[in-house]
Image: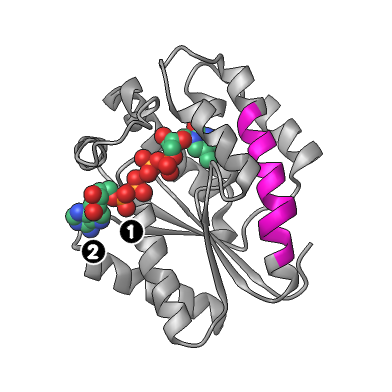
Amino acid sequence: MSAKGHFISFEGIDGSGKSTQARMLADDLRAAGHEVILTREPGGSAGAEEIRALVLQGDPDRWSAETELLLFTAARRDHLERVINPALAEGRIVICDRFADSTRMYQGLSRGDLRGKVDALHDLMIGREPDLTILIDMDPGQGLSRAKGRQGHEERFEDFGTDLQTKMRAGFLALAEEFAPRYRIIDGAASMNSVAEQVRNTVQAYLNP
Ligand code: ADP
Ligand code: TYD
């Protein structure tokens, strides 16, 4: 557990601009003299990146929601042990593109209600939340068209379509209420620089209360 660092996560639907904003925030904070680790899930450590390929590539029906939950949690445990916790213990700012809230949404809600199992496994194996979570809120159609524009091969979840993204958007907004003290919501529809400015102000307010 960290005594000194700060753990900041970005959440939101696919294509909402999380990776872009996480990168811009890392650049800003580094320019201001902070020691920053920019990382992502699924992945972020060597072992977790191997699991990433298993969960993000291939047919949408490749895994059941339960199997996926175990794989994402295994990846997170490795990432936490090897990257996040050591960096926090050294007093760094860890910026993570998605964390456990994504599991609460995608595995917890997408195919039936598995939220109870997600939370139980989280308590057992992860047991920590970010200090600050920035939700980039975005219209699902706009997010999906941005995500599709990227042309990758990690499209398993994007292939679930707009209905899933609509459900995820509502779910993230509900999560922001459930975990209100650590959540800040930012509208992702504006230009990259304008979203980045809001992110910067939000993080400054958190770091200098
Ligand atoms: P996410 O990580 O949430 O999936 P990305 O940061 O990868 O989203 O952004 C998805 C796509 O949309 C990328 O091609 C990115 O360049 C573009 N993009 C990101 N933010 C904006 C923005 N504010 N306006 C227009 N396009 C954006
Ligand atoms: P990511 O690379 O962040 O995709 P994007 O940039 O399109 O938002 O994450 C890939 C997918 O993995 C995304 O569709 C959400 C899914 N995911 C889960 O289903 N559970 C999880 O715990 C995490 C971290 C991601």
The yes-or-no answer for disc 1 within 8 Å of ligand 1 is: yes
Q: How many marks?
A: 2
Q: Nearer the viewer, residue 88 or 115?
A: 88
Q: Mark 2: which amino acid?
A: Met
Which stretch appears magenta? 71-86
Q: Mark 1: which amino acid?
A: Thr
Does the residue at mark 2 contact the one at mark 1 (Cβ under 8 Å)? yes
Q: Is residue 106 visible?
A: no
127 up-or-down from 64: above or below: below
Q: Quadrant of the C terminus?
A: bottom right
Dot 2, how many residues are within 10 Å of its Cα: few (below 14), some (14-19), or many (20+)?
few
**Residue at position x 42%, y 19% in the image:** 58
Residue highlighted by disc 2: 192
Q: Is residue 98 visible?
A: yes
Is 76 within the magenta?
yes
Q: On the rendered structure, is 202 left or right of 9? A: left
- The disc at residue 20 is 1
The yes-or-no answer for disc 2 within 8 Å of ligand 1 is: yes
151 up-or-down from 45: above or below: above
